[in-house]
Amino acid sequence: MKFPLFSRRQAFSRGVVLFALSFCTPFFLTAHSHSARTKAAQQDVAKQDGSMVLAKVGTESITYQTLEEAFRKNLNNKNARLSALSPDSLRDFLNLYINYRLKVQDARSRGIDKKPEVELDIAQNRASLAAPYLFEKAIVSPRVDASLERRKQQFRVGLIFSKIAMPDTNRAYTRSLAMLKLLQKGADFKQMAKDSSDDEYFRNIGGEMPMVTSDRILREIENAAYTMKVGDIYPKPLRSNLSVPGYYVVKLLAMEARVTVRGRYINIKRNEQLDSANAENTAKKLADSVYAVLQKGGDFAELAKKFSNDVYAEYGGLFPSYYSPTTGYLNGLRYRFPESVDNWLLDSKRSNGELSQPISTDKGYFIMRRDSSKIGGDEREEMKRFYKRVHFENDKKIFFDSVKKARKYALSQKTFDALMKALDTTRPAFDSAQKVKLPAKLLKEQLASFTGYKLTVAAFADSLLQRSDLRGFSLTKQGMMQAVDKVVETAITDALTKNMEKDFPDFAALMKEFQEGILIFRVEEQEVWSKMKFDSVKARAWYEPKKDNYRTTVMYDFSEIWVNADSVAQSLYKRLQDNMKATKPSATLFDSLAMQFTERSGFKERKGRWEPLDARPYTIPEEFKKRGTKVGEMLPPFKFQGGITIPRLNAILPERVKTFEEAIPDFAAQFQDLQQRELTQKWLESLRAKFPVNVDEAALKRVRQ
């Protein structure tokens, strides 16, 4: 079984090296194949002693907890249990993990972890991992958790909008405030929205919006809605800075549980080629007949595949995920059913398993089956992707602003102004020549600071020169202020992530795995990959008994006359046909015409002759094969690669065994794998002698009890 932990060909970059990549799929398959036993084991097996030692590798102990954590990462399943494995699979997994630990110990015994280039690599990669981890913990996860909780409800608000019109930016606010006071005294909200909203849409609907849920409306309005009771008017106007800035007066009209459903549907559309009466009649008759079959126990999925005019017909009309009108599907499609279908699906009296009669909509007839329902039901990963795309950058700025305030951040305006005065703003960007011109005294000045950190002008200038992410900032006050913020944010991130391993045990485990991955990569380079040279003698000995497995395909040797104009092609083809009918046909006429007339670049001097090709789609040999062309025959002109071709078949080269040299590209990877396994096995055997391995058979047996 192939198990090169952190092998050279695995994903290994300056990003995260996932420990799970080091384990092979067969363990998942083994566990899955015993699914019934697995469930029983998870229910019946006594809780294992996590500190129970299963094996020792050198001076290192492998406990039950350590091995089970590795197993869970392999499956990406935090609930997986070692006790679910068969005895053979458990032993195999333990042996593979032992091999992993042997490699790590070997790397450390060689002092690889102390080499400067390795320490630098680890430090650089820690920096690239720490910031995303921090933002995930401090910003992304809490916000996504909050949105998931909020999405258990849906709400409807009333809105009255006052547009900010330049130059009087205060009008919209005072106008909104005045309306708010009138509403608080009992004025009719809907009528006021119709009379006073600066937005035509809000005027037409009386300000009453449709049902929405978290992340489906302006964030300020959403936040307000979740603090209000139904019927409340928010106590102050809410500012919006969207494409049309303005203020909103907000009233909460409804707040209720958000039910999401799964099921199947059949969509029978009207035939647009028929007149409206016939199209309606035909669609209704078909919908009624399909419904009748379903009532008699017909297979919904099969009927959907046969009759539904919809993208999900091939899936038997199955909803791709939980659905609600406020979000549509949660897998990125955002499909919405017509309102009448939504009303049927979400009717509070509706039972799971219930079948609808055909529902007439402008999109045809829908036959629905509601299979299951729950409150919320949104997918966390989908929510996270949406959040990162829409809200993350703004929330990150708020996060940094709060940290700056807590750490007493200060910018020296005097020093900043002096820097701007000293810069040559006619140049496109900061460069070394700019730094040379800065006064020595200014370079020593403090530009910005927060608790435990000071940024001098010299340090800022160095960052502008060295950091690629700062090269695009212009030498304007705005550009330089943004650059300062960027440098300070990096410093804040460094300060916050300084003790990440102590603050977050999961991050410490991640870094440990990553560091060990680097060590294994380095030691395998020395013991395996550097020794893997292609030995032609060994390769030939390996190839000979298997050579019949490496064969050429049938190849076609052919020439062509390729021209741009069809008329020219037809004229040349007639000349060639006349020549074939002549008493003494010229054997070289085709070559002569190809050398004279073919317009394919580089083919005149070759008399139109191609290198032999096999019969792949969209090739001339494919045409020979389909038409059963015989050697010496030519095909009539046809369109090919933007022109007109007249091809002639010169020869058919039959299938044969490839020579050793020809076969090398076919078997080189397989031969290399064999070498890699042999070198790895030899290395591991030497490591077991160097670092004694002892498996506690009694403890291993107790895992299954």
Image (cartoon, helix red, strand yellow):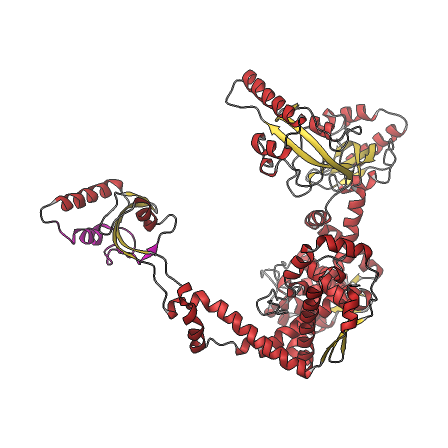
Q: Quadrant of the N terminus?
A: bottom right
In the picture as drawn, the residue positioned furthest to the top comes out as 277
Residue 659 image-quadrant placement: bottom left
Total numbered circles: 0
Residue 434 image-quadrant placement: bottom right
Percent of width and height locating residue 52: 82, 70
Q: In the rendered image of this protein, does residue 369 appear above or below residue 576?
A: above
Percent of width and height locating residue 288: 63, 22
Q: Quadrant of the C terminus?
A: bottom right
Tell me which secondary structure the magenta stretch mostly adopts. loop
User: Which residue is at the front of the view, 206 or 109?
Assistant: 109
Q: In the rendered image of this protein, does residue 188 appear above or below residue 101?
A: above
**Stretch in magenta:** 585-614
Left or right: 115 in relation to 665: right
Name the residue rendered at 50%, 71% in the picture. Answer: 672
Left or right: 11 in relation to 263: left
User: Which residue is at the front of the view, 56 or 120?
Assistant: 56
In the picture as drawn, the residue positioned furthest to the left comes out as 583
User: Which residue is at the front of the view, 382 or 252?
Assistant: 382
590 in magenta = yes
Name the residue rendered at 72%, 68% in the picture. Answer: 511
Percent of width and height locating residue 633: 23, 48
Left or right: 451 in relation to 359: right
296 in magenta = no
Q: In the rendered image of this protein, does residue 351 appear above or below residue 637?
A: above
Name the residue rendered at 69%, 35% in the picture. Answer: 263
Left or right: 544 in relation to 271: left
User: Which residue is at the front of the view, 605 or 281?
Assistant: 281
Q: Is residue 447 visible?
A: no
